[in-house]
């Protein structure tokens, strides 16, 4: 920061504020001097002090004062400069003396001041001696009259000693180098001149330094001002752009406000119409059922209501709310509605595929097969780079072969509404990767898809022959990925077989069917699990016993229904509660054979060693792999994990003690939960390893190393996915880590088979597509559905016409009294509700509903137990207020 120089003091006459303007003007008027200081025609012999003081008051410049004074004395007024005329300096000193003396005389009293004003200041003699060149010679004996000495009625204007010394004639032949020949007075005068010259030189040197500093300062200020001007120009340009954008946004806002105002008017008119609605609700529009009737039927059938019971249910609900329906759908009409729902789902799939084919994104094809009863089913779906999943459909097949599965896929895509002849080939070109399980038929199916894709690329890609080899290779990239959860599921047999071999070695029994620790895990799950058998009646006794002994976290997951990691999870929990289970078996009725067998197994140290090994596998191997599969951004992240796991298993196989120190191969994938994982992990590490456990750990780690080297062969260094992961990551960004989306399709269909075993496959497929593809748009889909009327229609209406009809229904407020806001930004987001500074609840926004004129939001919270949740409803405005105040926080 520049230091600003001190403010420069202007030397000159100080303005006299003792008298007012009028007083000084009066003095000048007495001498005939006007306000314009015109002195022509005025000649005086002498000028008193009062006139000089008045001139000082009105005229700041000394040259103006001396010119006016000489004019009043009748002397010529040639230009007088301070640089080349001694007269100017004499006059200036005289004037300053008068001004200084006036201040002193004024302090002495009014009379003395008036006498001072009348005293002589200047006459012609003051200028005459100087103008004629007569120097005043003063002898050494002549006394010097002090300044301000009064002689008669006026002060004597006497030259200062310096002026006299300057005007004194000195002989030119004086030799200053010889002090003996130089008079004393001349020597003294010479020394004074030298001293005075030094003082003047020092004064001018300081002033020159100040002037230099001022130059630097002003130069710096000029540079800064130029920079400020440039910045100001840029700011003006940005301001103009901002003003233009603001103007456009204001115009858009005005348009939105007008549209909202118009919608509000329509809404108010619709509400007015609703107030006059009678108790009879019309379900038909002309000869066909309305879209809202179609929606009601689809929703009832989704809840498991039989076709022949739909009409009765609607009648009961109408009686409950006090309305009656003009017509009710029959059983055959409901079945036709289900077929039209299938057409709706296929139209929705076709529209989404059109969007995918027009974009530059690649797709991942997911497939799976299963057998439901006597029917063999093949399901297909696609994954998109944004994480979305679209179910293409479920196709019954005669056999489980790869070629049959490919034919089913071609039939599903070709059977979509209004597709061109080359639509399936365009679809194959967009597919750059596949996701499935590692079954042989699935691997063969992927090879067929890859071959068909290579044949379709030259036909679909424009000017394919003109492309370079690098561009052609980009189109030929294709990768096969397998579900990582199946790696976890298959690892269970690897670990149990290693434990079985160790048990055979210890006990000497070579014909063991399964490891004893596996039998113990299944037994505990059957007796104490959440879906424990009621035949034994042990689960109720166990819950009561845990309550009396203040044992928390006493639940065990069910063994059946959990495919992948359940053996390892149950092993860690059984190990954690082993002492509680033994005490419970002792205190309860020992006549129960299962409890006796369980107690015997829990008191076996070898089995406890095996439980500890399986529990640590859950915490360090299968648990992190599960979380990686569910939460990784890309399946190629497995490359890093598999390499770390391989190194860790090699270390543990060489030094088994490393298996028990709690160091995970991937610490970032471990879960630290004070209610579950941390307590179980600490219990597993609290038991010190023995020679036996070290031996078991070495066996399990060697078996695990061989297994994971085979399972992750493509992701380890040297594998095809590991070597080319940077090149194929972009084209394979749609590939997920698991195949659970397509597998969940069969879970939905299993529910339908269990509740309605005689339901047709196409009807099951229709409901599965509606649920799986976009469950949050069920109302929109159902209201815009193409449907077959039981009485007249045999063709589905065009989809765009029905969507327009849906919008009209919404505007007329005839769709329903309850609507879902599925496109709102809050829907589906994870939240955290702060109860206090230390407590909070986690959950997610399930949906937002409009009931009449009120909006409500439904939030589902995670409960303490693993399989229980709690849903609550609150006003949307209340929820927004909690978000604004920070009580509700969205998880990133």
Image (tube, rainbow, N blue to C red):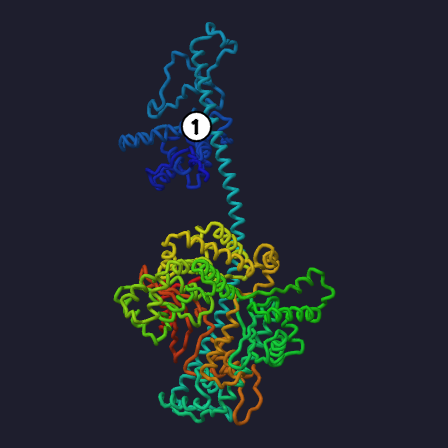
| Element assignment for label 1 | helix
Question: Could you tell me if residue 216 is visible in this image?
Answer: yes
Question: Looking at the picture, does residue 444 appear above or below residue 228?
Answer: below
Q: Position of residue 575 (x, y in %)?
A: 37, 61
Position of 491 compared to 540: left or right?
right
Question: Could you tell me if residue 885 is visible in this image?
Answer: no
Q: Position of residue 278 (x, y in %)?
A: 39, 91
Quickly name the residue at label 1: 91
Towards the viewer: 37 or 358:
358
Task: Determine the image quadrant of residue 184.
Answer: top left
Instruction: Name the quarter where the N terminus is drawn.
Output: top left
Question: Looking at the picture, does residue 877 appear above or below residue 606?
Answer: below
Task: Determine the image quadrant of residue 34.
Answer: top left
Spot the residue most to the right. 465
Q: Residue shown at 53%/76% (left/top)?
A: 370
Instruction: Name the quarter where the C terminus is drawn.
Output: bottom left
Total numbered circles: 1
Q: Residue shown at 63%/72% (left/top)?
A: 427
Spot the residue most to the left. 548
Towards the viewer: 388 or 644:
644
Position of 658 compared to 18: left or right?
right
Crowd class of label 1 (few under 14; some 14 to 19; many from 20; radius 10 Å):
some
Q: Position of residue 55 (x, y in %)?
A: 40, 35
Spot the residue most to the top. 180
Towards the viewer: 843 or 365:
365
């Amino acid at each position: 920061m520049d230091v600003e120089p001190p403010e420069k003091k202007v030397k000159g006459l100080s303005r006299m504020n003792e008298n007012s303007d009028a007083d000084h003007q009066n003095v000048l008027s007495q001498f005939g001097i006007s306000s314009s200081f015109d002195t022509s025609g005025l000649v005086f012999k002498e000028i008193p002090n009062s006139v000089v003081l008045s001139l000082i008051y009105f005229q700041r410049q000394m040259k103006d004062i001396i010119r006016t004074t000489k004019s009043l004395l009748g002397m010529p007024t040639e230009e007088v400069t301070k640089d080349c005329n001694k007269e100017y300096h004499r006059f200036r000193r005289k004037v300053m003396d008068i001004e200084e003396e006036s201040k002193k005389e004024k302090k002495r009293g009014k009379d003395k001041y008036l006498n001072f004003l009348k005293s002589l200041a200047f006459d012609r003699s003051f200028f005459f001696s100087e103008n004629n060149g007569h120097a005043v010679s003063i002898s050494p004996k002549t006394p010097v009259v002090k300044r301000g000495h009064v002689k008669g009625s006026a002060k004597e204007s006497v030259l200062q000693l310096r002026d006299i010394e300057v005007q004194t004639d000195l002989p030119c032949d004086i030799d200053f180098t010889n002090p003996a020949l130089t008079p004393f007075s001349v020597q003294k005068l010479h020394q004074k001149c030298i001293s005075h010259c030094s003082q003047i030189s020092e004064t001018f040197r300081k002033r020159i330094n100040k002037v230099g500093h001022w130059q630097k300062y002003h130069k710096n200020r000029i540079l800064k001002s130029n920079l400020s001007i440039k910045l100001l120009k840029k700011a003006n340009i940005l301001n103009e752009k901002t003003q233009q954008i603001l103007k456009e946004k204001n115009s858009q806002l005005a348009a939105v406000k007008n549209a909202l105002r118009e919608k509000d008017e329509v809404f108010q008119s619709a509400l007015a119409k609703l107030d006059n609605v009678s108790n009879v609700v019309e379900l038909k529009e002309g000869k066909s059922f309305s879209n809202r009737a179609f929606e009601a039927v689809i929703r009832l059938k989704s809840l498991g209501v039989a076709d022949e019971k739909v009409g009765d249910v609607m009648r009961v609900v109408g009686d409950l709310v006090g309305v009656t329906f003009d017509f009710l759908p029959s059983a055959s009409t409901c079945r036709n509605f289900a077929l039209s729902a299938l057409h709706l789902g296929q139209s929705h799939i076709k529209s989404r595929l059109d969007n995918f084919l027009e974009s530059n994104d690649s797709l991942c094809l997911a497939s799976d097969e299963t057998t439901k009863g006597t029917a063999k089913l093949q399901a297909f779906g696609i994954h998109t780079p944004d994480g979305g999943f679209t179910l293409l459909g479920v196709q019954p097949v005669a056999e489980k072969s790869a070629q049959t599965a490919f034919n089913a896929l071609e039939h599903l895509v070709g059977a979509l509404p209004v597709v061109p002849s080359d639509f399936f080939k365009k679809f194959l070109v967009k597919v750059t990767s596949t996701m499935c399980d590692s079954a042989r038929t699935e691997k063969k199916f992927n090879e067929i898809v890859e071959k068909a894709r290579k044949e379709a690329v030259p036909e679909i890609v424009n000017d394919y022959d003109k492309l370079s080899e690098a561009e052609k290779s980009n189109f030929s990239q294709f990768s096969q990925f397998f579900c990582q959860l199946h790696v976890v599921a298959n690892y269970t047999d690897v670990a149990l077989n290693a434990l079985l071999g160790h048990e055979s070695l210890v006990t000497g029994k070579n014909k063991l069917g399964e490891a004893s620790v596996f039998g113990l895990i299944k037994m505990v799950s059957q007796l104490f699990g959440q879906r424990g058998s009621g035949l034994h009646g042990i689960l109720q006794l166990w819950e009561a016993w845990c309550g009396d002994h203040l044992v928390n976290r006493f639940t065990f997951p069910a063994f059946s229904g959990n495919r992948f990691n359940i053996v390892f999870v149950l092993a860690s929990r059984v190990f954690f509660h082993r002492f509680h289970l033994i005490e419970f078996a002792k205190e309860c009725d020992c006549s129960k054979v299962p409890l006796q067998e369980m107690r015997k197994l829990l008191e076996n140290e070898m089995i406890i060693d095996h439980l500890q090994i399986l529990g640590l596998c859950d915490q360090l191997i299968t648990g992190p792999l599960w979380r990686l599969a569910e939460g990784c951004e890309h399946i190629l992240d497995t490359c890093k994990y598999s390499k770390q796991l391989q190194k860790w298993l090699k270390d543990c196989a060489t030094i088994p003690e490393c298996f028990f120190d709690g160091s995970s191969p991937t610490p970032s994938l471990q879960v630290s939960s004070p209610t579950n994982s941390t307590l179980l992990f600490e219990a597993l590490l609290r038991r010190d390893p023995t020679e036996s456990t070290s031996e078991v750990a070495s066996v399990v780690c060697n078996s695990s190393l061989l297994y994971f080297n085979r399972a992750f062969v493509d992701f380890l260094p040297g594998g095809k996915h590991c070597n080319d992961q940077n090149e194929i990551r972009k084209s394979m960004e749609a590939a997920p880590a698991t195949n659970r989306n397509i597998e969940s399709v069969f879970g939905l269909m299993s529910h339908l088979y269990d509740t309605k075993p005689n339901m047709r496959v196409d009807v099951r497929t229709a409901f599965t597509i509606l649920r799986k593809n976009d469950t949050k748009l069920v109302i929109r889909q159902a209201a815009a559905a193409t449907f077959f009327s039981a009485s007249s229609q045999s063709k589905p209406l065009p989809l765009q016409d029905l969507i327009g009809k849906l919008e009209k229904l919404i505007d007329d407020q005839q769709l329903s009294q309850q609507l879902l806001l599925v496109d709102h930004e809050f829907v589906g987001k994870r939240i955290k509700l702060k109860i206090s500074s230390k407590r909070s609840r986690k959950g997610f926004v399930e949906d937002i509903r409009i009931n009449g004129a009120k909006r409500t939001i439904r939030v589902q919270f995670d409960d303490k137990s693993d399989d229980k949740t709690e849903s609550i409803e609150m006003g949307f405005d209340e929820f927004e207020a909690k978000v604004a105040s920070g009580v509700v926080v969205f998880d990133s």
